[in-house]
């Protein structure tokens, strides 16, 4: 029987970023999948019950462990992945800290069963709260099965921090999806309470992405390649029309490891600056490969953060690679079939490629990316900011009208309707006169306020007016977002949304609040789910309601410049009078501003 694992000397463990990695079921699963991938598995299956709170099992067909190694693997700082200090500079495996298994085993009822190809029998080790209860021989195929039951059973304080089963399931789904994108060559499956969340056959990156981000979204993805003498960049990025409300669809990997790094994220967002609205995020799967000496993954115990030796060079290489695709705008003509060439980016070959990159690092001529491509407000793309995100969508929508075509119920007489309209300034502001005052109205803020007030009134008197969509809209989400949608389904129905899970990470929206029913609800739903996810607790909905109504109001009106005729201006002023009109729009921006004659005279030095 072979022995690969040894305990790291203290001099080395002192150099390893310390800290807890077991936070919730999803973090346990991340550690276990990393181990399976490091063990060369080509098939990994995850099964959870009650969101992983009751049970987590991860089964792989990797190289397994001998009996001695299996016992050693449960000791702290026991690893087969590094041995001496200098190995820290050359990490090619996902793990290296030797802490995951003992940490997990100390806070759960844990079993490890494993067999190496060369042994006749496997080993089963049972541990409870860190104490070995049993070690026995067992029959099994080559590979490893780790089951974690009743996580935190001995740490009631931690137990309290776990969320509902659906929420935890959402996080587990997202973790498996992220890791599955990093290795399209490996088969993954994930079941939750015997329901299948994911079943992914070995594939290429493009197909894997389609399964993870959704087929519709994946049609808007375009290959990206680039880099410089140290960095190789590849993957897929979305057309600016495909946006999400959060960063959860930005998948970035350094040498095959999923990371969430500020520098990388900033580079991605810089490239998209000016082509997508603020607060919107693209869908991106980006693989950055560089010699291991160029990047330090030993910064944080979860290894999600990294430090680059040449931070700004990496940043610029990423930004240039993405900006180049945006400049070419391959979505403008009929989208070409996405080429398979960009797909050899991931998979088991990554180690070889890193080695090759290291070798070639001196030989490769530097590639210069384009200089500045965009500045804010100078978009080269015809991007609509009205929320229509799927150009291929068959739904027929009426053209947007600036204000909801609801005529005032009765002729209101009030401050705003009594103003004498002078006209419109810059297609954004309405200028009016009231005696010796010039009244300037921000038409967008005003119509948003009108819509918000109308929604609030409807909410007060029962529920928001809802309208069936002519064609139900499918919306592709992350696992966590689906969990939020399911959890708040009844509350969302009260504010006019009818939605139901449509399998995997898709939901179907069949009705929306009437004031937004003519628009594509995709972006609004994403925004609302992101808001709810941020609020988090079960009491969230009532607390979040006002901000959700202001979201809906915001989506119901047109942003930016918009030419209005006199009748439309009058109509808006009437509506403003019917509204309980606080001086600001729901975002807290002022709606109107008064310049007095005296102020003008002062400007012109007439006093
Ligand atoms: P690390 O991955 O940082 O080395 P872990 O505590 O996660 O630390 O695992 C300890 C050791 O146990 C690993 O180095 C590896 O040798 C072994 N091991 C863990 N999981 C598996 C697995 N699924 N298959 C084979 N070996 C494994
Ligand atoms: Mg590990």
Image (tube, helix red, strand yellow):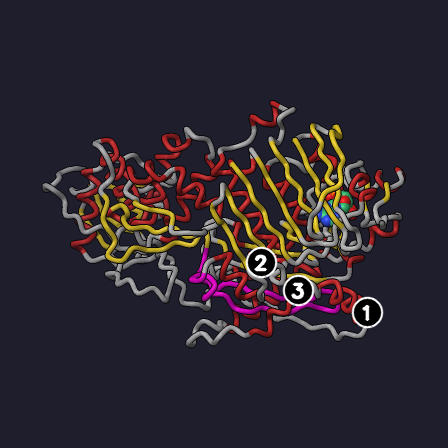
Q: Position of residue 503 (x, y in %)?
A: 41, 51
Q: Nearer the viewer, residue 426 or 534?
A: 534
Q: Secondary structure at mark 1?
A: helix
Q: How busy is the neighbourhood of tag 1: few (under 14 within 10 Å), some, or many (20 plus)? A: few
Tell me which numbered mark, 1 or 3, is placed earlier along the sequence. Answer: 3
Image vertical order of residue 501 relative to residue 108, above or below: below
Q: Who is closer to the viewer here, 21 or 518?
A: 21
Of labels 2 and 3, earlier in sequence is 2
Kindly report which numbered mark, 1 or 2, lies closer to the viewer in this rendering. Answer: 1
Q: Which residues are magenta?
A: 215-243
Identify the residue shown where x is 37% and y is 65%. Answer: 391
Q: Quadrant of the C terminus?
A: top left
CA separation, marks 1 and 3?
19 Å
Whether pointer 1 and pointer 3 mark residues with C-beta atoms closer than 8 Å, the reply is no
| Helix, strand or loop status at disc 2 | helix
Q: Does 583 sit left or right of 70 as displayed?
A: left
Give yes or no for residue 330 being in the magenta stretch: no
The residue carrying pointer 3 sits among few (fewer than 14), some (14 to 19) or many (20 or more) residues within 10 Å by Cα, namely many
Residue assigned mark 3:
317
Residue topped by disc 2:
268
Q: Is residue 483 above or below residue 564?
A: above
Separation of residues labelled 2 and 3 (CA atoms): 10 Å
Residue at disc 1, CB closer than 8 Å to ligand 1: no
Q: Kindly identify which residue carries mark 1.
A: 359
Q: State the residue in front, 97 or 469.
A: 97
């Amino acid at each position: 029987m072979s022995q690969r694992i040894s305990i790291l000397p203290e001099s080395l463990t002192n150099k390893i970023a310390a800290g807890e990695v077991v936070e919730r079921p999803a973090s346990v699963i991340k550690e276990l999948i990393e181990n399976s991938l490091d063990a060369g598995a080509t098939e990994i299956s995850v099964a959870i019950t009650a969101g992983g709170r009751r049970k987590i099992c991860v089964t792989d067909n990797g190289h397994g462990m001998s009996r001695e190694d299996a016992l050693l693997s449960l000791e702290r700082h026991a690893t087969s992945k590094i041995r001496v200090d200098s190995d820290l500079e050359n990490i090619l495996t996902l793990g290296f800290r030797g802490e995951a298994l003992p940490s997990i085993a100390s806070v759960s009822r844990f079993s490890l069963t494993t067999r190496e190809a060369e042994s006749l029998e496997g080993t089963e080790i049972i541990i409870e709260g860190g104490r070995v209860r049993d070690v026995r021989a067992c029959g099994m195929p080559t590979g490893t099965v780790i089951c974690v039951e009743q996580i935190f059973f001995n740490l009631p304080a931690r137990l309290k921090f776990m969320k509902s089963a659906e929420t935890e399931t959402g996080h587990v789904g997202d973790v498996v999806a992220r890791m599955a994108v990093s290795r399209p060559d490996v088969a993954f499956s994930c079941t939750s309470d015997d329901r299948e969340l994911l079943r992914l056959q070995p594939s290429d990156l493009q197909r894997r992405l389609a399964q993870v981000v959704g087929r519709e979204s994946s049609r808007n993805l375009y290959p990206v390649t680039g880099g410089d003498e140290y960095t190789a960049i590849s993957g897929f990025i979305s057309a600016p029309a495909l946006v999400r409300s959060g960063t959860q669809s930005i998948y970035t990997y350094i040498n095959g490891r999923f990371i969430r790094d500020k520098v990388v994220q900033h580079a991605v967002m810089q490239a998209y600056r000016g082509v997508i609205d603020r607060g919107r995020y693209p869908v991106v799967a980006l693989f950055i490969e560089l010699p291991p000496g160029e990047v330090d993954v030993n910064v944080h115990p979860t290894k999600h953060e990294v430090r680059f030796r040449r931070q700004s060079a990496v940043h610029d290489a990423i930004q240039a690679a993405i900006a180049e695709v945006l400049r070419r705008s391959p979505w403008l003509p009929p989208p070409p079939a996405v080429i398979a060439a960009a797909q050899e980016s991931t998979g088991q070959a990554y180690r070889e490629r890193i080695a090759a990159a290291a070798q070639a690092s001196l030989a490769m001529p530097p590639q210069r990316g384009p200089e500045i491509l965009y500045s804010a407000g100078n978009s080269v793309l015809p991007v609509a900011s009205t929320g229509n995100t799927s150009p291929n969508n068959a739904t027929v929508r009426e053209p947007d009208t600036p204000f909801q075509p609801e005529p005032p119920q009765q002729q209101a007489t009030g401050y705003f309707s009594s103003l004498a309209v002078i006209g419109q300034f810059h297609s954004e502001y309405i200028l009016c006169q009231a005696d010796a005052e010039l009244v300037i109205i921000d038409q967008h803020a005003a119509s948003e306020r009108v819509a918000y007030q109308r929604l609030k009134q409807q909410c007060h008197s029962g529920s928001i007016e809802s309208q069936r969509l002519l064609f139900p809209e499918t919306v592709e989400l992350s696992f966590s977002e689906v969990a939020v949608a399911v959890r708040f389904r009844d509350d969302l129905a009260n504010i006019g949304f009818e939605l139901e899970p449509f399998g995997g990470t898709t939901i179907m929206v069949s009705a929306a609040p009437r004031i937004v029913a003519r628009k594509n609800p995709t972006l609004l739903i994403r925004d609302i789910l992101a808001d709810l996810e941020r609020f988090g607790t079960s009491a969230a909905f009532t607390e979040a309601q006002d901000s959700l109504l202001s979201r809906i109001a915001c989506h119901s009106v047109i942003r930016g410049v918009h030419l209005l005729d006199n009748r439309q201006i009058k109509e808006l002023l009437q509506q403003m009078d019917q509204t309980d009109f606080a001086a600001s729009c729901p975002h807290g921006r002022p709606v109107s501003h008064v310049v007095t004659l005296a102020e003008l005279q002062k400007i012109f030095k007439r006093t």
